[in-house]
Image (cartoon, rainbow, N blue to C red):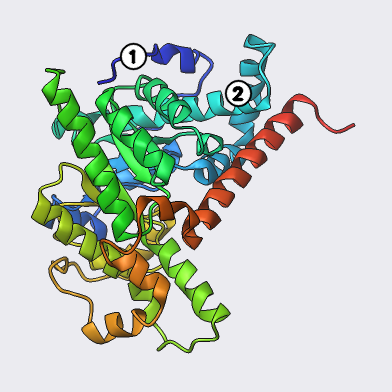
Amino acid sequence: MSLVRVDPAEGRSAASPASPSPVESVDSPLNRATRQFPQTALWNDSADPDELARSIAFGAVGATCNPVIAYTAISKRLDVWAPRISRIAAENPTWGESRIGWRAVEELSIEAARLLEPAFRASGGRNGRLSVQTDPRHHRDADALVEQAVRFSGLAENIIVKIPATAVGIRAIEEATYRGVSINVTVSFTVPQAVAAAEAIERGLDRRSAEGLPEHEFGSVVTIMGGRLDDWLKQVAAQQRRLITPGALDWAGVAALKRAYAIFQARGYRARVLSAAFRNGLQWSELLGGDLVVSPPFDWQLRIDENNLPVARRIDIPVDERVIAELETLEDFRRAYEPDGMTVAEFDDFGATRATLRQFLDADAQLDALVRDILVPAP
């Protein structure tokens, strides 16, 4: 998979608890959808092995993660992770909190990746992927993003690496693809970001082909965090004291996802669109039937089932043109919805980008603090 391979044993020890076995398949809207529309891949938006095992029972064939999710998964199981973090520190006496914390994230990812190996084999590498996100503190350094991506891709053969759709990140996505890394584009909320990222992946793949490098199924995906686009536009509308028809702003992310999907299909991009950052059931039900990935957190999967959401092909049904017309009264929606709404240089200053980068950086700081509290407890 990667041109550089790291021994997975480096990221775990015999003391590591065994990963849970997936539970038996259950009948539910999610389960029915994965049978009726197998091309619409369900991934779990967490690398927590317990949640992932339960999600696999719904038909999940992949998983995503980010610094917030990783911190949450570790902090809620300190009975397991505190001794493991102490062990990592003891084995590496010169490491600081950040390096220790990221090794814990690697171990978490390796264990979750094992659960997805059957789906990886069955799909030839298209699914069965476990996402690991590059350190958000590298967001200004393309070389650092690429080097970390290469390292992460060597943790397990079904690892897929998250790189942000920022100006620096777009360069890193192309180079990491060229170097054999399967990519999950993140910190991405808009159609222009998705298109630019897909083009970067294409350039990386074409460079590999031109040099005769091995071709295989990369399984790369381009995320649009639809719920975070909704969040940002609601904030913009409030700041501008705009009264938008109730519910209209809940369609913004769905509209961006549907438009990006149509463009990907028309242009034949080899990466798939991925729907993440769920805020409502539309971000699942409106995409059914598409050759794409939906990645709800496990709690959202439970909500979808508890409310028995209908299972029907809706990817080809456009968002109501009256809703689009109202959303287009907000400049930031137009920037997000039109394929040429932003240049690559403008990605970093988009409000949702800044808000999400800050949240990911805060999660990094929280993980550092958690490690410090384990190693140097308060008196």
The amino acid pointed to by label 1 is: Val
For the residue pair 73 and 347, the one nearer the viewer reads as 347
User: In the image, 129: left or right of 147?
Assistant: left
For mark 2, give the secondary structure.
helix
Quarter of image, res 229: bottom left
Crowd band around label 1 with a 10 angstrom C-alpha radius: few (<14), some (14–19), many (20+): some
**Could you tell which of marks 1 and 2 lies nearer the N-terminus?**
1
The residue lying at 11 percent from left, 57 percent from top is 36
x, y (%) of residue 12?
48, 17
Up/down of 85 relative to 189, above or below: above
Q: Amino acid at mark 2?
A: Arg
Q: Is residue 72 left or right of residue 108?
A: right
Q: Nearer the viewer, residue 280 or 331?
A: 331
If the image is split into quadrants, where does the N terminus sit? top left
Q: Residue 38 placed where, x, y %?
A: 13, 50
* Front-lying residue, 178 or 279: 178
Q: Which residue is mark 1?
A: 4
Residue 343 at x, y = what percent?
35, 55
Residue at far right of view = 379
- SS for dot 1: loop
User: Residue 36, relative to residue 310: is it above or below?
Assistant: above
Vertical arrangement, residue 351 with respect to residue 309, above or below:
above
Viewer can see residue 354: yes
Report how far apart the C-alphas of labels 1 and 2 lie in the structure.
Answer: 20 Å
Write the residue at 28% across / 48% down: 196
Disc 2 marks which residue? 99
Q: Quadrant of the C terminus?
A: top right
Residue located 47% across and 30% down the image: 108
Q: Position of residue 93 (x, y in %)?
A: 69, 11
Callout 2 environment at 10 Å: few (<14), some (14 to 19), or many (20+)?
A: some
